[in-house]
Image (tube, rainbow, N blue to C red):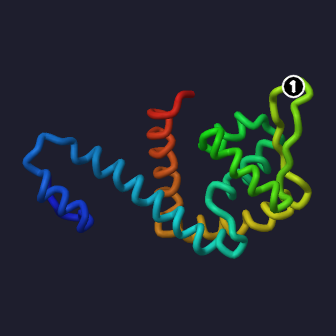
Amino acid sequence: MSAEGLLPDERKVLEELGHLSLDFRAMWAISNLFRSSAAIRRHMEAKVLAPDRLSWTSFVGLWVLWVWGELGANAFADAVGISRPTATGVLRTLEGRGWATRRKDPADGRGILVSLTREGRTKIQHLFPRFNAEEAAIAGSLSPAEQDQLASFLRTVARSVVPA
């Protein structure tokens, strides 16, 4: 495998592990997906979410409730991609800010329903356009056709690891 076009970290991995029988193409694909995801998350937290003292996870929680509406607590955790105990902490934060509310599920005495408050809806409606503008700036290094192709590739990867 040629080191041409690789990042310095990738060249180092190839130098150290190149003698092993590994699938370097798969490694580069997944490690760059992870590297890009982590960098984008840090960037968005610093540039878009920090002024509102929001973590990535709290932002995703607001967004999920905005798009999907009221959800059971377990469905909320699943949609945000976090554990149920972590969801409890996120909901505590959102409730403390007055952006979300929990109530007992009348159809299931043990269940909890989660929804945005009016303030939470206003917050995400004002915040999301800034977030999306930053998404556009990041994706702007790709042509529209490349953006479509990347999204398609990433959907394929997601489908390979997430049950339908």
- Answer above or below: position of 78 versus 134: above
Q: Residue at x 53, y 28 (%)?
A: 163
Label 1 packing within 10 angstroms: few (<14), some (14-19), many (20+): few
Left or right, residue 55 beside residue 73: left
Q: Residue at x 66, y 69 (%)?
A: 49
- Answer above or below: position of 50 versus 139: below
Left or right, residue 122 beside residue 89: right
Q: Position of residue 101 (x, y in %)?
A: 86, 48
* Identity, as a three-letter code, of the amino acid under mark 1: Gly
Residue under label 1: 109
Callout 1 secondary element? strand
Quarter of the image with the C terminus in it? top right
Q: Position of residue 128 (x, y in %)?
A: 73, 63
Left or right, residue 51 beside residue 155: right
- Answer above or below: position of 29 versus 5: above
Q: Residue at x 12, y 56 (%)?
A: 16
Please state the total of marks drawn on the protein image.
1
- Answer above or below: position of 30 versus 110: below
Left or right, residue 136 beside residue 70: left
Q: Position of residue 57 (x, y in %)?
A: 63, 54
The extreme left residue here reads 19
Q: Nearer the viewer, residue 137 or 43?
A: 43
The image quadrant of residue 62 is bottom right
Q: Residue at x 83, y 37 (%)?
A: 113
Q: Position of residue 69 (x, y in %)?
A: 82, 43
